[in-house]
Amino acid sequence: MTETTDLRAKQPRFRGLEAGHRACQGCGEALAARLVTEAAGPDVILTNATGCLEVFSTAWPQSAWRVPWLHSLFENSAAIASGVEAALKAQGRRTKVIAQGGDGGTFDIGFQALSGMLERMHNVLYVCYDNEAYMNTGIQRSSSTPHAAMTTTSPPGKARMGKRHMKKDLLSIIAAHHIPYAASASVAYPQDLRRKVRRAMEIDGPTFLLVHSPCPLGWGHDGTLTIEVARLAVQTGLFPLVELERGEVASVMPLRRPVPVAEYLQRQTRFRHLFADGDHRAREEREHLQALADYNIERYGLMGDGDDPFDSEGADTIRRGGPART
Amino acid sequence: MLEALEGSQAIARAVALCRPQVVAAYPITPQTHIVENISKLVADGRLDTQLVSVESEFSAASVVLGAAAAGSRAYTASSSQGILLMAEVLYNIAGLRLPMVLTCANRALGAPINIWNDHQDSMAVRDSGWIQLHCADNQEAVDTTIQAFRISEATDLPVMVCMDGFVLTHTLETIEMPDHKVVDKFLPPFKFARALDPRNPISLGTLVGPEYFSEIRHAQHKAMTDALETIVEVDRLWEKASGRACGGLFTVEGPADAKVGVLAMGSVVSTFREAMAELPSRKKAKLINLRAFRPFPAAALMAACEGLTDIVVVDRALSPGWGGILGGEVKAVLADMKKPPRVHNVALGLGGRDVPLEAWTAVVAEAKEPAGFRILDLEPAKLEPSDL
Amino acid sequence: MPVTMTKGAFAKAGTSLAFKTGTWRSARPVHVHAAAPCHRACPAGEDQQAWLARMQEGRPREAWESLVAANPLPAVTGRVCPHPCESACNRGKLDAPIAIHALERWLGDEAIRNGWTYPIPTGQPRKERVAVVGAGPAGLSAAYHLVRRHYNVVLFDSMPEAGGLLRSAIPPTRLPRDVLDKELSRLLALGIEFRPRTALGRDVSLDELRNEFDAVFLGVGAGKSRHWDVDGAVPADLHEGLHLLKEWLQVGALPMPKAVAIHGGGNTAVDLARVMKRAGVPEVHLITASGLPGPDTEPDDVLNVVPREFEQAVEEGVKFYPHRTINRLIMRGSKVVGVEMVRLKKLPGANGRKTRVAFEGTETVLHVDMVVPAIGEVVDPAGVEALLHGKDYFPADRFGRLDGQAGIFVGGDARAWVKGYPNGTVTAAVGDGRRAAEAIDAFLSGRAPVEEERPPIPYEALNLAYYEPSTRIELPTLALERRNDSDEIEGGPTAAQAAAEADRCFSCGNCLACDNCWTLCPDNAVIKTVETASDGSHYVFDLEYCKGCGLCAHECPCGFIAMEAEAE
Ligand SMILES: Cc1cc2nc3c(=O)[nH]c(=O)nc-3n(C[C@H](O)[C@H](O)[C@H](O)COP(=O)(O)OP(=O)(O)OC[C@H]3O[C@@H](n4cnc5c(N)ncnc54)[C@H](O)[C@@H]3O)c2cc1C
Ligand SMILES: Cc1ncc(C[n+]2csc(CCOP(=O)(O)OP(=O)(O)O)c2C)c(N)n1
Ligand code: SF4
Ligand code: SF4
Ligand code: SF4
Ligand code: SF4
Ligand SMILES: [Mg+2]
């Protein structure tokens, strides 16, 4: 029993994911999961797809979870959540179910189960921690990996410049399910993230949250920079923060000043080959990524008109005593 | 009350009597009628359950996994390709030690695609950690289904009730449907100690490394072998409650002094029973009706085979390159006897090939053949010369 | 570890706490408590960051109490200090510095309005007696800080009232006398024995003071004008600037030439120029060797007044002649009829030191009928010859200690320039008094004096993503046509303005309880406490679990967290 044990017990916020988990230093996914559980509160049941989060949080006989938690497989988080939810309904319990998965478990292998869960209108919040590759198995590309990014299965070389295909537009597919609420969020904007979780928690029905969660190991940046990198993803337009109600764009986080994508790319070794001297393809792919960001900005109407307290620069500001906007 | 019911309908009714809180299933022949009947019961308000019509067997199994973990009595049913699509989840359910019941309407596995009965599907998941109970007829299937919930909840092991597709599921039989009150008394509401509950938040489905994995597996194996006793006990209790037993782990039928035994599982047992009764027999043989395939009743079986010179094991599935799966297991078990009988192994009725009464004679006659494996009802004339 | 919970390998909530990830760490986060640049730049030694923090918390009285722990005269300095703190303010690199002087003034005025009293730390009364000579800002500050340390203080001044140049020279349009009176009377009421009209060297000697007191502080200012001539020529009716100002303040008399050339680049020159201009002198020319405030002027070459004084002077019609000196007086008889100016600049010479170089061929003539030198003052040696050794100022160190004169301390305008501790301002005098009080206390307690040495936190150490751009408050100034010789020209902020302005402060180097570290640590290794932790913040690092990722340090807006390598 140390001094901190005692203080830890008196933390003013409930935290669903406890210390002692084995995520890498600066892991965005660990942070994202904690923020989600923090906003959700203790009256929840979580499910989890196989992936880093599951592995680093529950090395038996220990667990970092402070809320009931169930892991089964890589591809069935949404389906076991459906089952938990059905059971709760049968028992007349009102506890909310949150299904969690990585981008691999969500965009790819668990995609069908997710679609089924949404279609059946289960009262489940599905949270995808998007770190844009299969990290747990050592950084392989997923359908969420951004175009041109290097992974161990999309290495750059003479014939290829990293991943050939585009990042899957999952949110649009989710939108097509016509569910009450879906949104994207980022660990760089914890207030916004928590607000979105709370919004989803209030809804009786399926909701979806895509949380951009940098992986220092897989993206090749120092753990120190996790938030900065996540922030730049939003500020460049590469990862737009949007909210969809019944599939329609209901709000976006406007960009005050779009940051050039190079600012974002430069900080990560997964894009290192895009800065190779004398390789004309490098420039081309950089421009391509810039064009993709510009496309997002146009498509979602991300350009703000004037300073907005909730835009990409205002939303994370602080004042004495806490965040400036909550 | 006696009723003439199709097997699937009877199973649906039996399931309803057990008051499952969550049912999830995906249609596949020959399981379809079970799901349809349950859906109808729900639609008619005769079964109050959360019926989750999933988008795949994979999700069906996942849903019942989640439901059981959340403390609900859960039920699913499948067949063949569906069982294989569930396979990953089935291992998981068992590893998580979640109680629930699954009806496997046994069917062949493709390719070639074939919708008729054999045991290849349940055999494919025999190592998943599920209790597997086979039924010789629909009355047994009804009674076993009810027992299965009780066994499962007593052992924290999932139970697969195997009944032959079409032969049982689609056949009209006269069934004694137990009374609601009897079942309610026999099967009290499900209470799950490890249920997901914010008031006692545990983590289920953790990562176990090499330093503990063997111990976890050992615990699971021990629970399975301990379940042999539970299966017998539950059958006895059901007999007390309903007046009907299903034969515990297995039954031995026929002349006690016979030196030849025939071991079989599923609906062929009913065919053989009828043949024993009706065909004029030149040779005496006992019939061993194996009900509990998993856990495997090794010791009891050895005792039952005392005095046999030959045993013919009838397989409804086959492990290509090896032979009969059940045969191989029986042979391995009996090898530990002081004077083991010779083990003959035949497969028959694959992919729904008809097993007529006469098959009994051929099976018993197999005892005179050299030990080994063959497909008994093979028709060589249909083979290409190179396959001969 | 006994194998339990084997049924399905379930685990109990939060048991990962048994796994101490702190062992992974190669660097640990620490709270650095770096000094804010404003604090380090403040000659009086105020910790603006600290009192702005109290302002941000909506506790102005505590802000004022924190402020007066260093500077007892905020209503004065908030008006007259050239605020080097604002020049150093990190916020200046983002948009505009915090208007520290305006907030200081607001707090000073609030204290007067509400009758707040100085908080005096508790402590044992000291029996030692200290003589403080000179009741200007240096002496007042020394006396105040000695009283805070519970010494017996006797304050001497040759003048009938306390205040030094604050009272005798600074125009009331910049420092209203009722403000001065109220601030000083509160100070003097602290239990200081004030002996006015008592001049050292005339009414009391240094030796007497040495005998009667355990220590002596000399805050006598620089009361004697520097000698001025142009190649030996001096106008017959020469009046030097400070004298004119003092006379105007005391008796209201001011000469009324048609055109005057004032020579000098400090407060005296500018104040006099403005007073004369506002009094109706048609042409007021100010000739200074310095440059004018502006982005291209080097800091050591700029007019030695607050930029807004210069701007107001221009507004009022004073003509400035920067980088110039008077080359020749054009006389008719003993009367001046004009001056010849030449351009010059301070340039590094062969030895690297800057000297003034006049540029031949740039001579011009100004027609004036009066020339007033205002090039500075030196210590009046009367009574202190033994300590001055013929020098202009006392050669004291930054603590005011005079070599070989144990028990004698000097501060304010009277001390010679010490590197890093420029004087010549009110706040510098206040700072000198505060440091001297520490030195006197140390001397009387037989220890070495100590002073804040923390380096200021640079702009680059802040994380600016967390601050919104915002505009600095604009203060009201009296319209040109309404300016006279008594009404204060510049107004103070409203309470709402003050609060908004304080909110702009970054809290450089010091925790502002933004929760970022607590919110963003992926390992829950930052714990928030209800009670303040030992270091005054509300956050504790749980080193049992901290993996040392450095994320908290990077996302701390104000640079309060640094990563320190772990010992191998
Ligand atoms: C016109 C003018 C405008 C100024 N404007 C500003 C401004 O805007 N901002 C700013 O920061 N600074 C300004 N200054 C400078 C500032 O006033 C001085 O730097 C400051 O007052 C120095 O304080 P001090 O206590 O060292 O000396 P002083 O203020 O000169 O006080 C010295 C005191 O010692 C007394 N004294 C002297 N000799 C004796 C003796 N022998 N015995 C007893 N008592 C004695 C004097 O009567 C006087 O009260 C200005 C100066 C002038 C002249
Ligand atoms: C059916 C199946 N296929 C493959 C795997 C191996 N596997 C485990 S986790 C994982 C990747 C997880 O990626 P993602 O969902 O993005 O989560 P992350 O680890 O990146 O957080 C893979 C491929 C598996 N466990 N199950
Ligand atoms: S590999 Fe990436 S996602 Fe996985 S624990 Fe490490 S930082 Fe987190
Ligand atoms: S921003 Fe605040 S703390 Fe930082 S230098 Fe300016 S006044 Fe001082
Ligand atoms: S963010 Fe947490 S783990 Fe990382 S250095 Fe700070 S306290 Fe340690
Ligand atoms: S991040 Fe915020 S709360 Fe944490 S130390 Fe820095 S200023 Fe204080
Ligand atoms: Mg991933």
Image: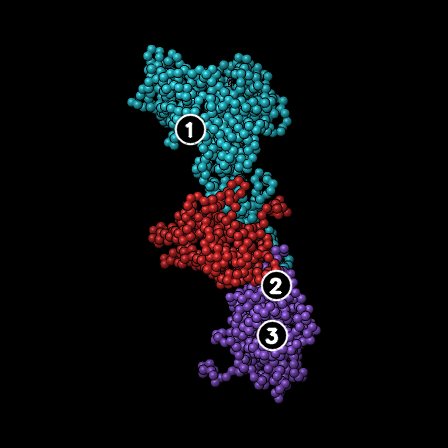
Chain colours: A red, B purple, C cyan
> Residue drawn 40% across and 21% down?
C277
Residue holding disc 2: B72
Instruction: Looking at this view, name the residue that lies furthest to the left.
Output: C361
Chain letter behind tag 1: C
In terms of secondary structure, where does tag 3 sit?
helix
Chain letter behind tag 3: B
Residue B50 at what x, y percent from top left? 58, 65
> Residue drawn 36% across and 58% down?
A159
- Nearest the camera: A212 or C438? A212
Q: Are marks 2 and 3 on the same chain?
A: yes
Q: Are marks 3 and 1 on the same chain?
A: no
Q: Dot 1: few (<14), some (14–19), or many (≥20) neighbours within 10 Å? A: some
Residue type at tag 2: Ser
Question: Disc 2 versus disc 1: distance between alpha carbons?
Answer: 78 Å
Question: Disc 2 versus disc 3: distance between alpha carbons?
Answer: 23 Å
Chain letter behind tag 2: B
Q: Dot 3: few (<14), some (14–19), or many (≥20) neighbours within 10 Å? A: many
- Nearest the camera: C552 or A291? A291
Q: Are marks 2 and 1 on the same chain?
A: no
Kindly tell me whether residue A302 is visible in this rendering. yes
Q: Is residue C162 above or below residue A8?
A: above
Residue B157 at what x, y percent from top left? 62, 66
Question: Disc 3 versus disc 1: distance between alpha carbons?
Answer: 98 Å
In terms of secondary structure, where does tag 1 sit?
helix
> Residue drawn 66% across and 84% down?
B255
> Residue drawn 35% across and 50% down?
A277
Residue holding disc 3: B10
Residue holding disc 1: C307
